Amino acid sequence: MSLREALPKVNTALPGPKAKEILEKRARVIPAAIKSIYPLVIKRGEGAMFEDVDGNIFLDWVGGVGVMNIGYSHPALIAAVKEQSEKYFHSMMNITTHTGYLDLAEGLAKVAPVKGDVKNTMFVNSGAEADENAVKIARGFTGRPNIIVFTGAFHGRTMLTMTMTAKKAYAVGMGPFPDGVYRAEFPNIYRRPAGISEAEAVEYYVKKLEEVFIEVSPAQYVAAIVFEPVQGEGGFVPAPLEWVKAVRAICDKHGIMMITDEVQTGFARSGRMFASEYYKEAGCAPDIITMAKSIAGGLPLSAVVARKEIFDGTPGGTIGGTYCGNAVAVASALKVLEVMTTEDYPGKALRIADKCMKRFGAWKDAYEFIGDVRGVGAMIGIEFVKTKAGKEPNADIVNAIVADAWTRGLVLENAGTYGNAIRFLCPLCVTDAQMDAGLDIFEQSIKEAAKKLK
């Protein structure tokens, strides 16, 4: 059986002897501030599986934190990268034009669910760069200085995006931070104020957003409102559609750009190519969309898409860069777009989600410490609490589950402001047998953690 079809199998104590030696080298040669969550050393990967240097086989439900939607080492991507690498590795678009950049820009403009008929696309190298450039573009078009972001947000680790990011564990000792970034309360329906309905909660969070115009920045100075359709680090919290409609109306009223950060939700994860497609279908498409992570199957690339008139307001020379739209990464991304379309990756996400939500929902009913199960498509979060009634965050059981699962061959990761959620970001090419094995391991780990923490 190939690795692509294999099931999880751990044959050694973890970390194994070869992994230990490599991890000792890691500790010597790279900064400790680049944290290592798991003592795992990958040797090769196929599909949703990877093998470590000691021959252990793991099912990956983290996927490089949303990078591997198409899976490890897809043969079509390997061929595309090999073909391009034999022509040239790189050609800076400010110096010479290469057609791959143009073809991908055109392809993404066709599928990106942003307002407007004529769209432009620009490429950079990471999600943080895409978000930062989206802010620059919005400021350039509107002539305004300020942006509004949200509690629970994660947008990156550059100086601007660290400021935009809510969780300041990612910004310890890094200040002072740029001005002009203001924060509103994100609509976390599970943690809405006690005694109000979900519909009332949407109204509550809309009012919280509007209060920013009164208390922090008048609307006429706000260039953009930036949010994730499903918060990643915030705990996989989806933005309610009715709230998004209200945000769109606020933006239209005040001439503000609505930016959706689809760095993690993009490329079929949500059951659409982009989660913002749900917004477009409901008449509340964003003005600007950012994307990265799974865009090129693991190669560094990111993009910003908006209607042409928005880009036309950007002063010349303020966007772009040396490696932006690298030819090899673009070749891989073109193949990602083709494969995800022809093989219906959004459909794969919905089928995976259906299986997961049934099982996760049953666990929620069975276990007092599972407070909420939520998500969009196959971007699913499970929030763990001490009691259902009190909703007290329970990071201890999450840490115990994650620590137990990888010893059984399943790689999980936590999320959330208090580290009390487990995120599901499995590659969408996972087989049914692998999904079943992963779900079984996950439940075993839940039971084991519950015993230890009694």
Image (cartoon, rainbow, N blue to C red):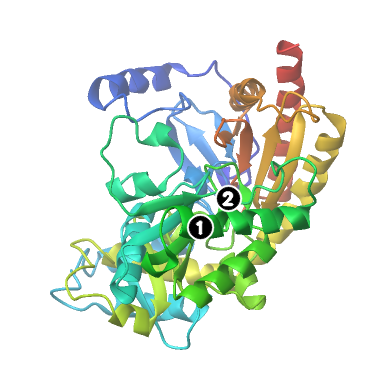
**Tag 2: amino acid:** Phe
Is residue 262 toward the left or the right of residue 302 in the image?
Answer: right
**Tag 1: amino acid:** Phe
Q: Would you identify the image quadrant in which residue 376 lies?
A: bottom right
Secondary structure at badge 2 equals: loop
The residue pinned by badge 1 equals 227
Q: Is residue 454 visible?
A: yes
Secondary structure at badge 1 equals: strand
- Residue 199, horizontal then vertical, whole percent: 77, 58
Of the pair 90 and 308, the residue shown nearer to us: 308
Of the pair 309 and 426, the residue shown nearer to us: 309
Q: CA–CA distance between discs 2 and 1?
A: 9 Å
Q: Are marks 2 and 1 in contact (CB under 8 Å)?
A: yes
Q: What residue do we see at 58% from left, 73% from top?
A: 249
- Residue 405, horizontal then vertical, whole percent: 64, 26
Q: Which mark is residue 186?
A: 2
- Residue 364, horizontal then vertical, whole percent: 81, 36
Q: Nearer the viewer, mark 2 or mark 1?
A: 2
For this orientation, the residue located farthest to the left is: 95
Q: Would you identify the image quadrant in which residue 43 lies?
A: top left
How packed is label 2: few (under 14 Cα within 10 Å), some, or many (20 or more)? many
Quadrant of the drawing holding the N terminus: top right
Q: Earlier in the sequence, mark 2 or mark 1?
A: 2
Count of numbered badges drawn on the protein: 2
Quadrant of the drawing holding the C terminus: top right
Q: In this rendering, is residue 272 above or below 116?
A: above
